[in-house]
């Protein structure tokens, strides 16, 4: 078990030090963690000098601990996700082994670990995998309480603690295991919910964990943390479309209802070829098994909850993948069998081999992921705008360099420049750019190429050097051309 968890963790760690932080979320989480460490404020996260209310603090605390060990780099801020992904796989191994044997546990761990969605979020500097671990532990503990053994009596306390930690990772979504409890085995419900004081005490523990951080955070921000963190990022996402992630209007909402039931074939790839057969087997036979019924309920609760939410992002159903991996592993043919999972074939209609086919798919995907991480990640790093910019300008920067940008407001720019610059990235309007660059001291202004002529006319001000930078934004899939305007001011000596 330890070797499998270690191998999975290493697979998720591969290439993380060479790939720059991508998308908008990774650099925001990473920079907020760095500012938390530098400023010593462990209650309210900040990004670029201002409040960051998007997520509770658990992931920042974990990334801060990792940075203390590995330094302030990309590997450090991604390591907690890799660790949580490996621990989630370990939980699935234990769960599956206790339910239907060691082979089921091993397969569940591998199905979860070797799929598209976990490849991305198992190495991302974001909160999702931390929440998934807490979610899975809570669901597992609820199930354990239905097993007749004194060794699992601790599971009741762990259930509520996992829910509390899950909220501190990513908010109320971590409490969805509570919604699935009516479908848990009868013995589990009886152990968790009776007598009456047990759930009351559990809720007190869970809410107490949240309040220990939440009350000081609300007092410090005048209630703004709840207004933005819950009001905007939970309620507003539920009733409306945010940042273009979804279809507007009643017709758009109805058209988006099947989204996750289609997107799961991407999230769970390459195992999604087996989904129709597994779903058919579950509906015909396994749903009458108490454990399989509970796992199916967990999956459907997650999919149902986010289907009703207006904002759609493919990774929102990530908490359902561990339960789905267990169902898929349990439906797989026994060792030595050669038929497809009972209930039919996969999408193309062919029967698939048993043990041998599973091993081929698992090994093939692991090799594919390793090649991407070890070969393509370093190649991609050479072409991201922020890293190209850093390579050109890093030797000129000092702690007192003032930095600013106009339209190119990528969070990765903040993370990259603050490796050496002490101040924060200013956001300027075109009218302020000329006045800002003329102020004394070393200054660096990042503009998109098309903006420069509109600001400075035919040429840049005297003493200002224009450095062209070109790169490819991975998250947006577009090539950008930048111009870095550099004014030395009084040169300060800097170390490497």
Image (spheres, grey):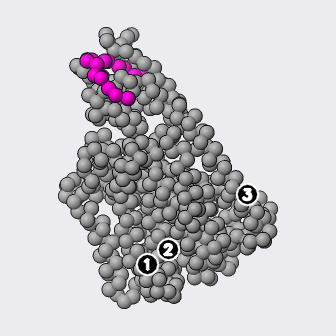
> Would you say residue 254 is visible in this rendering?
no
Q: CA distance from mark 1 to mark 2?
A: 8 Å
Tag on residue 360? Answer: 3
Q: Is residue 172 above or below residue 481?
A: below
Does the magenta-highlighted stretch encompass residue 488?
A: yes
What residue appears at the point 66 percent right and 48 percent down from the top-left corner? 368
Horizontal placement of 288 versus 316: left or right? right
Q: Which residues are magenta?
A: 483-496
Q: CA distance from mark 2 to mark 3?
A: 29 Å
Quadrant containing the C terminus in the rendered view: top left
Q: CA distance from mark 3 to mark 1?
A: 36 Å
Looking at the magenta stretch, what is its main secondary structure? loop
First in sequence: mark 1 vs mark 2: 2
SS category of the residue bearing label 1: helix
- Residue for badge 1: 155
Tag on residue 357? Answer: none
- Residue for badge 2: 140
SS category of the residue bearing label 2: helix
Horizontal placement of 128 versus 233: left or right? right
Badge 1 vs badge 2, beta-carbon distance below 8 Å? yes
Does the magenta-highlighted stretch encompass residue 462?
A: no
First in sequence: mark 2 vs mark 3: 2
Q: Position of residue 175 (x, y in %)?
A: 41, 69
Q: Is residue 327 above or below residue 220?
A: below
Query: Which image quarter: residue 284?
Result: bottom right
Q: Is residue 292 above or below residue 366?
A: below
Q: Position of residue 68 (x, y in %)?
A: 36, 49
SS category of the residue bearing label 3: helix
Q: In the image as oriented, which residue stretches furthest toward the bottom?
A: 195
What residue appears at the point 27 percent right and 62 percent down from the top-left corner? 213
Horizontal placement of 185 versus 217: left or right? right
Badge 1 density bin: few <14, some 14–19, many ≥20, Cα 10 Å = many
């Amino acid at each position: 078990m330890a070797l499998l968890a270690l191998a999975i963790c290493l697979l998720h760690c591969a290439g993380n030090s060479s790939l720059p932080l991508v998308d908008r979320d990774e650099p925001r989480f990473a920079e907020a963690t760095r500012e938390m460490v530098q400023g010593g404020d462990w209650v309210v996260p900040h990004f670029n000098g201002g409040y960051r209310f998007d997520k509770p603090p658990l992931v920042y605390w974990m990334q801060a601990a990792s940075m203390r060990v590995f330094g302030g780099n990309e590997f450090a801020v991604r390591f907690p996700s890799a660790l949580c992904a490996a621990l989630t796989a370990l939980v699935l191994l234990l769960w599956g082994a206790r339910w239907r044997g060691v082979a089921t546990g091993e397969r569940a761990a591998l199905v979860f670990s070797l799929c598209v969605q976990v490849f991305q979020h198992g190495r991302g500097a974001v909160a999702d995998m931390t929440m998934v671990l807490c979610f899975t532990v809570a669901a597992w503990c609820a199930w354990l309480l239905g097993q007749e053994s004194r060794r699992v009596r601790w599971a009741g306390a762990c259930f509520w603690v996992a829910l509390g930690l899950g909220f501190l990772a990513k908010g109320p979504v971590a409490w969805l295991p509570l919604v699935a409890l009516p479908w848990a085995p009868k013995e589990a419900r009886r152990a968790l919910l009776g007598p009456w004081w047990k759930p009351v005490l559990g809720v007190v523990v869970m809410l107490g964990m949240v309040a220990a951080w939440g009350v000081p955070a609300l007092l410090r921000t005048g209630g703004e943390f709840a207004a933005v963190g819950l009001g905007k990022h939970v309620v507003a996402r539920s009733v409306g479309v945010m940042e273009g992630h979804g279809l507007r209007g009643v017709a758009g909402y109805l058209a988006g209802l099947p989204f996750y039931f289609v997107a799961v074939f991407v999230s769970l790839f390459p195992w999604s070829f087996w989904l129709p057969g597994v779903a058919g087997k579950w509906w015909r036979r396994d749903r009458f098994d108490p454990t399989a019924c509970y796992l199916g309920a967990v999956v459907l609760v997650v999919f149902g909850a986010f289907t009703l939410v207006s904002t759609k992002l493919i990774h929102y159903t990530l908490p359902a993948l561990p339960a789905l991996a267990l169902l898929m592993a349990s439906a797989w043919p026994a060792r030595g069998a050669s038929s497809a999972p009972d209930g039919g074939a996969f999408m193309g209609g062919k029967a698939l081999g048993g043990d041998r086919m599973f091993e081929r798919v698992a090994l093939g995907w692991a090799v594919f992921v390793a090649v991407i991480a070890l070969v393509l990640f370093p190649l991609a790093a050479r072409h991201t705008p922020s890293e190209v910019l850093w390579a050109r300008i890093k030797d000129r920067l000092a702690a007192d360099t003032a930095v600013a940008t106009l339209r190119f407001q990528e969070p990765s720019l903040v993370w990259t420049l603050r490796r050496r610059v002490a101040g924060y990235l200013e956001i300027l309007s075109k009218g302020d750019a000329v006045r800002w660059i003329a102020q004394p001291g070393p200054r660096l202004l990042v503009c998109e190429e098309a903006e420069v002529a509109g600001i400075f006319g035919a040429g840049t001000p005297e003493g200002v050097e224009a450095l062209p930078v070109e790169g490819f934004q991975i998250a947006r899939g577009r090539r950008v051309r930048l111009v870095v305007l550099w004014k030395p001011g009084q040169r300060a000596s800097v170390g490497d």
